[in-house]
Image (cartoon, rainbow, N blue to C red):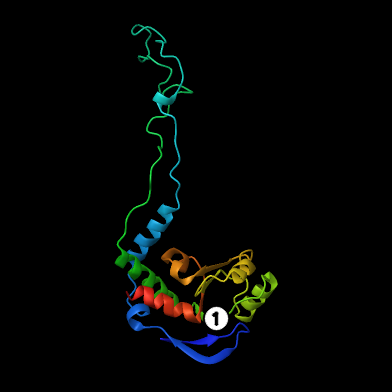
């Protein structure tokens, strides 16, 4: 598959870039995508939630009432979950939600997500560019030139360009990242994927290993 390379004015440069069929043209694997996105979201969880159990409550353990003859259930401690202010039964405890996935499966998931984007015509390729100084207004004008203003957009650069990042970080619905950090969740969590010319080659090299 081939796409035209645009400049930041939104006009065609006359160059085309090809996407390798063995990487971007595969049959998407939905289950691999599901597992990779699930792992990404699980890794974002801090897992520091905690509720106090009866062992963590500082209350008297004096027997409240006699064992028999009251007509009610037996009760031996105010720490019981049955009483207001008592410990919580089976409450959440700190835990690690992360889990392991094979590298090959994660590669298949990313390639599948990119294949969906290409199939839906949601990928734009622009020639590599940089900014002399951080200018948010200039970044917004680039999005307007590409007819992407106001839409959820992920711009993928070949390397870290701090001025471009600083220009676009405050733009609503827009995010910027480098090609070697691209993951399945971020590919799918955007409406339009803007790839710089050299980032396509980097992504292709990573996914073809």
Q: Is residue 4 above or below residue 140?
A: below
Q: Secondary structure at mark 1?
A: loop
**Number of callouts:** 1
Q: Position of residue 109 (x, y in %)?
A: 36, 68
Q: Position of residue 71 (x, y in %)?
A: 37, 10
Percent across and percent down for residue 52 are 44, 30
Residue positioned 38% across, 77% down in the render: 205
Of all residues, the one furthest to the bottom in this rendering is 14
In the picture provided, is 137 more to the left or to the right than 189? right
Which residue occupies 51% across, 81% down?
125
On the image, which quarter does residue 141 sit in? bottom right
- Residue 58, x across and y down, in percent: 46, 20
Find residue 78 and report its image quarter: top left
Q: Which residue is mark 1?
A: 128
Pick whichever, 73 or 34, lies toward us: 34
Within-10-Å neighbours for mark 1: few <14, some 14–19, many 20+: some
Q: Residue at x 42, y 53 (%)?
A: 43
- The answer to which of 100 and 66 lies nearer the viewer is 100
Residue at 38 percent of width and 46 percent of height: 96
Judged left or right of residue 145, residue 182 is left
Residue 9 visible in the current orientation:
yes
Compared with residue 92, is residue 178 higher up or lower down, i.e. above or below? Answer: below
Q: Quadrant of the C terminus?
A: bottom left
Q: Reply above or below: 46 against 139.
A: above
Note whether residue 119 is visible: no
74 lies above or below 119 = above
Q: Quadrant of the N terminus?
A: bottom left
Q: Nearer the viewer, residue 2 or 71?
A: 2
């Amino acid at each position: 598959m081939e796409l035209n390379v645009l400049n930041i004015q939104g006009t065609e440069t006359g160059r085309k870039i090809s996407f390798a069929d063995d990487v971007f043209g595969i049959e998407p694997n939905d289950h691999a995508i599901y597992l990779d996105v699930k792992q990404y979201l699980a890794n974002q969880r801090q897992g520091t939630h905690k509720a106090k159990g009866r062992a963590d409550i500082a209350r008297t353990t004096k027997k409240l009432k006699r064992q028999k003859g009251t007509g009610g259930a037996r009760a031996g401690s105010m720490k019981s979950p049955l009483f207001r202010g008592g410990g919580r039964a089976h409450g959440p405890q700190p835990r690690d939600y992360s889990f392991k996935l094979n590298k090959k499966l994660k590669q298949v998931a990313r390639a599948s997500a990119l294949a969906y984007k290409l199939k839906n015509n949601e990928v734009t390729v622009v020639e590599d560019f940089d900014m002399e100084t951080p200018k948010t207004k200039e970044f917004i004008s680039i999005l307007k030139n590409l007819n992407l203003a106001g839409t959820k957009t992920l711009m993928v650069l070949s390397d870290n360009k701090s001025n471009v990042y600083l220009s676009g970080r405050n733009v609503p619905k827009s995010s910027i990242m480098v090609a070697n950090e691209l993951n399945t969740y971020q590919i799918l969590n955007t409406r339009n994927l803007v790839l710089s010319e050299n980032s396509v080659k980097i992504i292709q090299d990573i996914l073809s290993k």
